[in-house]
Image (cartoon, rainbow, N blue to C red):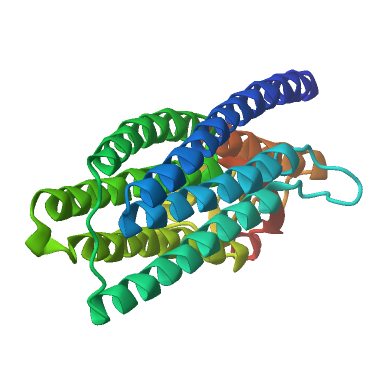
Amino acid sequence: MSADIKANNTIDRTDNRTQLASGLKVTWVGLAANLVLVVIKFWGGIVGRSQALVADAVHSVSDLFSDVVVLFGLKWGRKVADEEHPYGHARIETISSLIVGFLLLVVALGIAYRSVLSIYNHKTSSPELLTIYVAALSIVVKEALYWYTVRVGRHIRSIALVGNAWHHRSDALSSVAVLIGVAAAHFNPAWHLADSYAALIVSFFIFKIGGSLTWSAFKELADTAPDKDILRTIEKKASDVLGVRQVHDLKARYSGRDIFVDIHIVVDPNITVRQGHAIAKEVEYCLVNEIRDISRVTIHIDPDIKKDV
């Protein structure tokens, strides 16, 4: 058993390095693309006289911050456990996800405030044709980044990376609203407020994604249990192990992408300590290898007192 565990640990460390490299690569690609888009959008929004495009550029600036946060979270959150952090560093990635979500909320409220003021004051806007091309370019680039990032994020099971992918998607959706708004204001001067309304719609998309991401990260930091289906699966797998008579006091929580499990198993009171330990190791091996995301299992062994009586 110990040889198998050592082999598995070596594989896990190698796999972790590969996953980290993939996560860092996709985030660096996103950061470079966002940097270019920020410059193009600000230039296009100012030269082309589009409030919505400038707001979209601010959104892309938040993407840059989000990329930096994710880079930090991936780099440190994927480190192996050490003496100071015996449970690993996965919560760093969760905190990164929380910061990304909070940034989205702040950006959304800022854009909405400026848009409402423009609508209230009937501030006219006559975007140039240039802004349409810039918005269209942003949609293509950000949607491509979304699919690339979400695919890698799901593969390496990184909530921060998946959250960053949705950051790209929210930027693409906001650019769609910008495209509609600037096109309406450009081709029909009577719709001069369309640009401001487009910016307001952008803020809604950003706020929705930011709220969802922040809530998910907060639940994890609050040690919220996995859903009931996962808990039932854990209980059934443990109960099916030979020698386990009953399972009780099952607790589980997320730590980054991983699930930590605490469980009590009831065994024959007449078996030896060695036999009880072997049953516990079998339960641990079963849960870690047969249920995705479980990485740590703490097992307490109870004697079946009723049977003994």
Residue 180, position in %: x, y? 17, 49
Image quadrant containing the C terminus = bottom right
- Determine the residue positioned at 56% across, 31% down: 32
In the depicted structure, whether residue 223 falls above or below residue 172: below
Q: Position of residue 83 (x, y in %)?
A: 91, 47
**Residue sitting at x 26%, y 51%:** 178
284 and 74: which one is in front?
A: 74
The correct choice, above or below, for 95 with respect to 36 in the image is below
The answer to whether residue 106 of the structure is visible from this angle is yes
Indicate the quadrant containing the N terminus: top left, top right, bottom left or bottom right: top right
* Residue 173: % across, % down: 29, 48
Nearer the observer, 146 or 284: 146
Image side of residue 292 versus residue 69, left or right: left
Question: Residue 297 at x, y = what percent?
Answer: 67, 47
Residue at image coords 42%, 32%: 145
Residue furthest to the bottom in view is 120
Tell me the residue at 55%/40% (across/down): 158
Question: Where 140 falls versus 221 (above or below)?
Answer: above
Q: Is residue 152 left or right of residue 117?
A: right
Does residue 225 appear in this view?
A: no
